[in-house]
Image: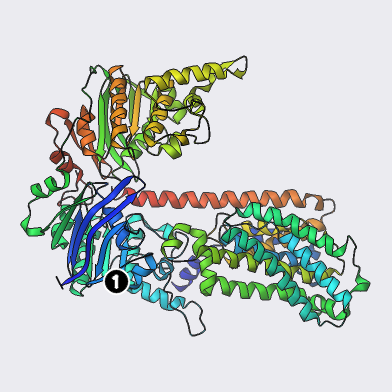
Amino acid sequence: MKKNNILRKILNYKEFGLVIALIVLLIAALFINKSFFTFGNISRTLTNNSVFAILTVGIMFVLITGGIDISIGSILAVSGVSVTELMIMNNSIPPIVLILAGIAIGAACGLINGFLVGKMKIVPMIVTLGTMYVFRGLAFVITQGAWRFPHMFTEAFASYAKTEILGFDAIVFWAVGLFIVAGLFLGYTRPGRRLYAIGTSSESSKVAGIREDNVKILAYVLCGACAGLAGALYAANYLTVSSDIGKGYEMTAIAICILGGVSITGGRGRMDGVVIAVILMSVITSLLSMIPGYSVWQDALQGAIIIVAVIVNIANGSLADKRALRERGNRI
Amino acid sequence: MNDCILELNDVVKTFGGVTALSGVQFRLKRGEVHALMGENGAGKSTFIKVITGVHQPDSGTILLEGKRITLKNTVESQKLGIAAIYQHVTSFPDLSVAENIFMGQEILTKAGTYNWRAMRREARKYIEPLSPEIDVTKPMSTLSVAQQQLVEIAKALSRNARILIMDEPTASLTRHECEELYSIVDRLKADGVSIIFITHKFEDMYRVAGRVTVFRDSQYIGSWDVNEISNAKLIEAMVGRELNQLYPEKTSEIKQEVLRVEGLYKEGYFKDISFDVRAGEVLALTGLVGAGRTEVCQTIFGIMKPDKGRILLDGKEIKINSPADALRYGIGLLPEDRQLQGLVYELPIYQNVSAPVINNFVKRGLISVKDEMAKAIELCRKIKLKAKDIAAPPSSLSGGNQQKVVFAKLLNCDLKVLILDEPTKGIDVGAKNSIYEIINELTASGYAVIMVSSEMPEVLGMADRIVVMRSGRVAGCFNIEDATQEKILAASLVKSDEKGGSAV
């Protein structure tokens, strides 16, 4: 009886499909290349995807409200280059201050997006398309087109991403920590739940007395802050910075969110789904890079996966609609 | 006078030029259930929105326990203990039932985070007496419409409302659920809650209400003790209007049958719909809002697909899979919402008129604007459109003239059957008359017209035959000679012994 319950719980688990996909992929990995399962490879894979993971959390906030932010790649760049320049100007600034500065710069960028979307009521796609260029331009102005290379970075700053803890790089723990904090925020706090409320029904939110504009601003500020953190950690991890960093990352982050079940129209999206999606995407890229000649397929495959994920979501949705209609029909 | 908890005097509310409430009064006694009745569009919904602070009255006073109040928004009315359960559910479909109930008044832990456990427990406490099978952890969207309404009721209960407004709460409930609701209403009454119960069902009124107030045409008609007024008198109070010279003399001659539907069925919307319409005839499809009339029309026009049933045109069965099919067969629809579905607001009038038949004006692969305009002008003359410029967009026209553009568009197609969904909705009296004349001319020239209308005088003034729908079924058919307002209203209201609609 009890066993039955557990089984049902597993089957009813929302991200069941994703978990199955992940398991299938991991079994495939066994045949493709056994060295996938070496600790070194797993650790490296996680490190390589931590920046994406942080960006994904950020954009998740915005997607849940029904918005979108395609400027996060540019925010990452502004934050990354600013932090790097600060460090070069004054080597004695404590690295934690640099990281906080990166978050603050990102949050400030997010505030601009949030103000334009929330208060000025401009379509998010247009706002962030504009600021995507503005922020990228700012990054270029700050660097004056110059590249910064590893020898210019301080040991202390780099250690914030690269110190090994239990065999994993510190940057992995930043991502994991952010997942936990963001998960709690979305699930258990009033502002977190407000993001879902305005995303699921703007009309009902008004009736419930929720200030939609302020909630939107919050979402974009949080998203910007995450992108800012990602920028600072990008610099500390890769130790090579130019105004071009993070280009196109926004699309990958959005893609991971969609794969993880975050609704592009707002209101839906759970942290566990996104975590699994991040892992899934990481496994795919890692596996492809291990098969000679197949890494060129990465983009095409990523795109195909998104479309499949969306089709599955739509199928689920129409099933639910049919069920509701049938129940109504019973009463007529 | 002191036993009144809520008192409204001379409340006036207008929207633009349309009067929604003109000098309405209302008295709600402490701990009473007060039924509010009236036809569609009598002003009940606006009245509720004034009490809850969604709309602010233009003039008049609202007294709560003898003190004058002004309500700027719903938050203020909630603070004063006024809660409303709207006819159209205002919920968050993606959020759980528990979260919906506690939206805005969440139970928090000491750390300030959501106390999900406590909220689920409390939510169950409020939901269980209403419907034990509702799982409070499931998203609202997985619930049926009736269940969602129960959640709304639970939400209001959880807010300890002193004044509870229910806008047709039993409209989508089964018999059993109604009984449950009645007992809850009784319990609330015993607890001293005052309830305004808007309903179309006499059953509701007799079961729960002590007094009844009737609105008609945005006006207050009267209040009675429920056991002092007869059904017949109440219906008279609700309809008692005079038919005047708004409707033109019939000039058409009714000929052969053109369209027939048999046993049309669509799960969740309507069942066993059969009727026919003849050339030169106006068949009115009436009933209360939500009875399924629009859905039937959309099905005939190919927007929705029926699960069962046949549609016959000139005696031959046809399959209509899309509006394009319908138009090819000669069936046209004038949609209820002309702004959204009938017109392209930004395009010039003549392009709107020619949109469905644009291929007719193509010469050597290009559109001949000259021909297109000429035809549009001809049609607009025919329907006496008042427009300064045929190239101006429809947004520059009045509501009545916009509707004429939609008519012109339909006339441009080669049609036999016209389905008109609320053709005079939101149009002022003068313009209504000219719409009626157009309809009259159309039937005279051989069109078969199906007219969906909620307005009783319009139905009686225009129709040759009347089909009344109720909860997705045909509840009555009348020839115009033996139709009266009372008969139609009686057919459209749900009878007291009807089991949620299982039998008619």
| Residue A280 x, y percent position in the rendering | 68, 61
In this rendered view, identify the residue nearer to me: B495 or A34: B495
- The figure's colour scheme reads rainbow
Q: Residues within 10 Å of mark 1 (few under 14, many from 20)?
A: many
Considering the numbered disc 1 on the image, is that residue within a helix, a strand or a loop? loop
Task: Specify the quadrant of the image occupied by residue A36.
Answer: bottom right
Label 1: which residue?
A: B161
Residue farthest top in this picture: B364
Q: Is residue B121 above or below residue A61?
A: below
Q: Is residue B143 above or below residue B271?
A: below
In this rendered view, identify the residue nearer to me: A107 or B87: A107
Amino acid type for the residue under numbered disc 1: Ala
| Residue B101 x, y percent position in the rendering | 39, 68
Residue farthest right in this picture: A151
Q: Is A305 displayed left or right of B60 in the figure?
A: right
| Residue A13 x, y percent position in the rendering | 53, 64
Where is the N terminus of chain A found, in terms of image quarters? bottom left
Read off the chain for label 1: B
